[in-house]
Amino acid sequence: MASVRQNTAQDKNAGNTMREEPAGRPVRSRLISGPGVLLVWLYGVMVVGAVSRSAYQIATDFARAPLAYSLSALAGVVYGFITYTLVRGGERARRAALVCCAAELVGVLTVGTWTLVEPSAFPDTTVWSDYGMGYIFIPVLLPLSALYWLRASRKRQPDAS
Amino acid sequence: MLDALTLVTGVAALLLALWCGWAAFRDQPTKDWHFIGMAVVLLLALVQLVIGIVALARGDRPAQGTTIFVAYLLGAFACIPAAGFMSLAERTRWGSVTAAAGGIVLAVLEVRLYDIWGG
């Protein structure tokens, strides 16, 4: 079952796969097996949450809290990209996801601290306010677990090939 | 009517989360019975979607805005099928964890729906 899915994914991106994978390892490492599937689900939920929320707020009342709404939109874009890299798989995607998760973690910690130190800058909350308390701290827990999972994936790869 | 259904759907989603979490705890993938459970919760979400739209059509207005209300209704409806398909693709305990996470997300959405409708 798993190998069938890998082959179809490979056919679709045959050009890319040949370019970035060394010969003799034609199949991309999967990042969404095991715990990865839970990560994709949670990231998917955050994409829908952050993007739809910021789209609605920017469309209806952007002037009220431009900084907060822009940050929510940025968070949504980052979540979207991480979800895409996780689903795509492969070494380059894994590295890109690592960088983005680190950036996401920095963003959550910065905005979280910022909202606590200077609440007046944020008339409305963002996804990352108070370290993501409004989202049961998923925004701060998710990059930590994703970083752990992506680092563990590198160790698994020699066995997978 | 909507409040009662929101409560029932939320509790059912939490029960589903517990059930799938138990399967994950015992290192098992989701089985047919879990998918039947998901179908029941999905049916509740569907009834909720229909009743919510009928309430809107009859002129009732949610306290925090119609757009947000409809968006959350659709999200609540899509939540369990999305998690279900992912647990179908991942036949390990992690598929069960994902289904359980789907139940928790739906329960959170129900709390938000209650707030959005009631104010």
Image: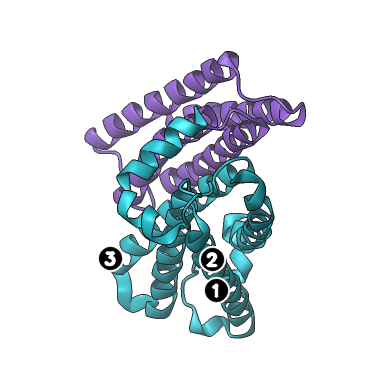
On whether disc 1 and disc 3 are found on a single subunit, the reply is: yes
The chain letter for the residue carrying disc 1 is A
**Which amino acid type is shown beneath numbered disc 3?**
Thr
- The residue that mark 1 highlights is A103
Q: Quadrant of residue B12?
A: top right
Tell me residue B117's x, y (percent): 42, 43
Label 2 element class: helix
- The residue that mark 2 highlights is A95
- The residue that mark 3 highlights is A60
Q: Residue furthest front?
A: A24
Above or below: residue A134 compared with residue A159:
below
Figure quadrant of the N terminus of chain B: top left
The chain letter for the residue carrying disc 2 is A
Q: Which chain is cyan?
A: A
Picture residue at 50% right of the left edge, 34% below the top: B86
Q: Which chain is purple?
A: B
Picture residue at 34% right of the left edge, 33% below the top: B52
**Which amino acid type is shown beneath numbered disc 2?**
Arg
If you read the primary sequence from the N terminus, does the residue marked by circle 2 or circle 1 appear first?
Answer: 2
Picture residue at 52% right of the left edge, 45% below the top: A41
Quick check: B20 left or right of A72? right
Label 1 element class: helix
Label 3 element class: helix
